[in-house]
């Protein structure tokens, strides 16, 4: 398999991709990322993902390295070399490496110097959703111990990775995070519940990432079906007593949750509303 990586205006084999140890992304997680799914080689909601990347860069005071047209040109060059039909495009931008390393100060918290930003992109294969029914998943709950700027798509994912690893060890796909008794989101997903045919999900705030698929499900699929939705805070008790629970993310769209901790949801099956939304999602991709 001939995987390619775009790094600072050059495309190389994955085995040859290297980053400086003095990159602020490596030293301080000083950067942001974005992930764009491609289904049958077509990008899904590319403009919305680009807008979120641009917004994340602005929120950490990092200049966008390219205009949108240039981004699209560079993405296209990499995508042309991708061997997959269904894949995710990972984009990462860090503040980069100091332009001068001769002052004896190789690491400092404050970004006081002039830097060459680092831009990295690569593709990872994902499943063809059109060939699959919605996959039932297990989840656990954990206290949300992340920082208070979760609406930035930061590359600092230490707690997310830790919680996701704990979930995996407990035979669960996702860790659903709880802050002060209120459900925020999953480590890599947004969370929806259904109770008495009313859908609920957490509102946009600094405590959750504004998921692109989340917005699509709310503004397109739920609206199309005229389902009732409440975008408001809800408790862990509401989560565990829901009729249906599903999560959304960019690469797997909509995933029904069959068990949370030791609590079985919807008798371990996919709920009617979740199933309908998933089918609508596949129809949109056709």
Image (tube, rainbow, N blue to C red):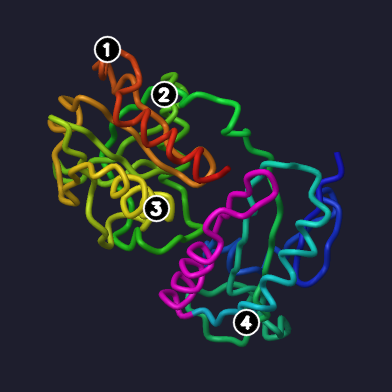
Estimate the spatial distance between the alpha carbons at disc 1 and disc 4, rounded to whole Å: 50 Å
Between label 3 and label 4, give the one nearer the viewer.
Answer: 3
Closer to the camera in the image, 25 or 212: 212
Q: What residue is at 78 percent from the left and 72 percent from the top?
A: 9
Which numbered disc, 3 or 1, marks the residue that appears first in the sequence? 3
Relative to 178, is 101 on the left or the right? right
The residues tagged by marks 3 and 4 sit, at their Cα atoms, a distance apart of: 25 Å
Magenta range is 34-61
CA–CA distance in space, label 1 to label 2 = 13 Å
Q: Residue at x 37, y 28 (%)?
A: 275
Residue at point 14%, 38% (across, down): 235
Residue 67, numbered circle: 4
Along the polypeptide, which appears first: circle 3 or circle 4? 4
- The quadrant in which the N terminus is found is top right
The residue that disc 2 covers is: 137
The crowding category of the residue bearing disc 2, from other C-alpha atoms within 10 Å (few below 14, some 14 to 19, many at least 20), is many
Of badges 3 and 2, the one in the foreground is 3
- Residue that mark 3 sits on: 216
Nearer to us: label 3 or label 1: 3
Please tell me whether mark 1 sits on a helix, a strand or a loop.
Answer: helix
State the residue position of label 1: 267
Q: Is residue 114 above or below residue 105?
A: below
**Is 286 covered by the magenta stretch?**
no
């Amino acid at each position: 398999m001939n995987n390619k990586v775009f790094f600072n205006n050059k495309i190389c084999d994955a085995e040859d991709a290297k980053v400086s140890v003095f990159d602020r992304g490596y030293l301080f997680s000083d950067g942001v990322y974005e992930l764009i799914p491609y289904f049958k080689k077509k990008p899904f909601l590319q403009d919305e993902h680009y807008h979120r990347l641009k917004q994340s860069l602005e929120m950490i005071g990092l200049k966008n390295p390219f205009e949108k047209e240039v981004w699209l040109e560079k993405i296209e060059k990499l995508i042309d070399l991708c061997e997959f039909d269904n894949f995710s495009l990972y984009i990462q931008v860090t503040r980069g490496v100091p332009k001068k390393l001769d002052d004896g100060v190789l690491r400092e918290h404050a970004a006081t110097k002039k830097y060459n930003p680092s831009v990295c992109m690569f593709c990872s294969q994902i499943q063809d959703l059109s060939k699959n029914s919605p996959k039932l998943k297990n989840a656990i709950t954990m206290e949300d111990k992340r920082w208070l700027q979760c609406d930035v798509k930061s590359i600092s994912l230490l707690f997310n990775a830790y919680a996701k690893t704990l979930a995996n060890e407990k035979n669960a796909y996702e860790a659903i995070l709880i802050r002060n008794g209120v459900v925020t989101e999953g480590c890599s997903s947004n969370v929806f519940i259904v109770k008495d045919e009313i859908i609920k999900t957490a509102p946009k705030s600094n405590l959750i990432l504004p998921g692109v698929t989340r917005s699509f499900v709310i503004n397109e699929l739920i609206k199309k079906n005229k389902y009732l939705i409440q975008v408001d805070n809800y408790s862990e008790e509401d989560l565990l007593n829901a009729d249906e629970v599903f999560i959304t993310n960019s690469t797997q769209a909509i995933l029904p949750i069959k068990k949370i901790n030791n609590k079985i949801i919807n008798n371990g099956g996919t709920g009617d509303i979740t199933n309908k939304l998933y089918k609508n999602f596949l129809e949109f991709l056709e």
